[in-house]
Image (tube, grey):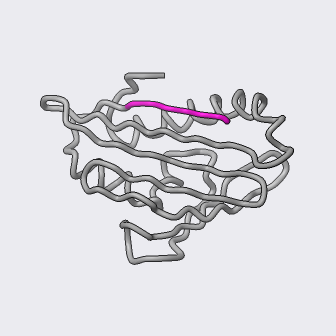
Amino acid sequence: MATYRTTIRTTRTADDVFAYMSDLLNFAEWDPGTKGVVQVGGNGPGLDSAYDVTVSVPGRDMVLTYRVIQFDRPRVVKARAESKTLISEDLITVAADGDEVLMTYSADLRFKGLLRVADFGLSLAFKRIGDKAAAGLAKYLDGAIVTP
């Protein structure tokens, strides 16, 4: 399984950070690996909303349908996508820290079946992709990365 985790410290309010991060339509703004997002279920952010997320993979684009499976405003959003070959889970947490806010973004990506043997290579590539996304998050949240 490939895992990426980063925390961004910002002076934005927890409500603002949560509103931005819980709307998966925004993923294409800060994640250079995301080519586009279309909401296909629900009406705005919330439990059971669904999004088709187009991501770049070597040699082609792939569409993953993410469903929001946990939504606790203004603290937690969890979304999950599953295809024939992989499972992806993204967890976003927002917490006040004095006058600032800490937003933690965690992503787990794992192959299914026989493809699991490629998990190590996936982990290496996922770190590079995650670092670029973390830089985008820091930019769009007007914050700074506090964990690699």
Spot the residue most to the front. Answer: 113
Relative height, residue 54 to residue 97 (above, below): below
Left or right of 27 in this view: 56: right
Q: What residue lies at 76% left-to-right and 49% top-to-bottom?
A: 112
> Residue 125 appears at what percent x and percent y?
71, 32
In the image, residue 13 sits, relative to residue 51, either above or below, namely: above
Query: Is 14 contained in the magenta span?
Result: no
Q: Position of residue 134 (x, y in %)?
A: 49, 34
Q: Which quadrant, please, contains the N terminus?
A: top right
Depth order, front residue of 8/49: 49
Residue 147 in the figure: left or right of residue 67 = left
Q: Is the residue 25 above or below the residue 138 in the image?
A: below
Magenta stretch in the rendered image: 1-7
The image shows a total of numbered marks equal to 0
Quadrant in which residue 10 is drawn:
top left
Residue shown at the point (51%, 69%) measured from the top left: 50
Q: Is residue 9 left or right of residue 126?
A: left
Left or right, residue 98 beside residue 28: left
Residue at point 36%, 27% (across, down): 144
**Residue sitting farthest toward the left:** 99
Q: Quadrant of residue 137?
A: top left
Query: Residue 141: x, y in percent?
Result: 34, 41
Q: Measuring from the top left, give residue 110's x and y in whole percent.
A: 69, 43
Quadrant hosting residue 127: top right
Secondary structure character of the magenta stretch overall = strand
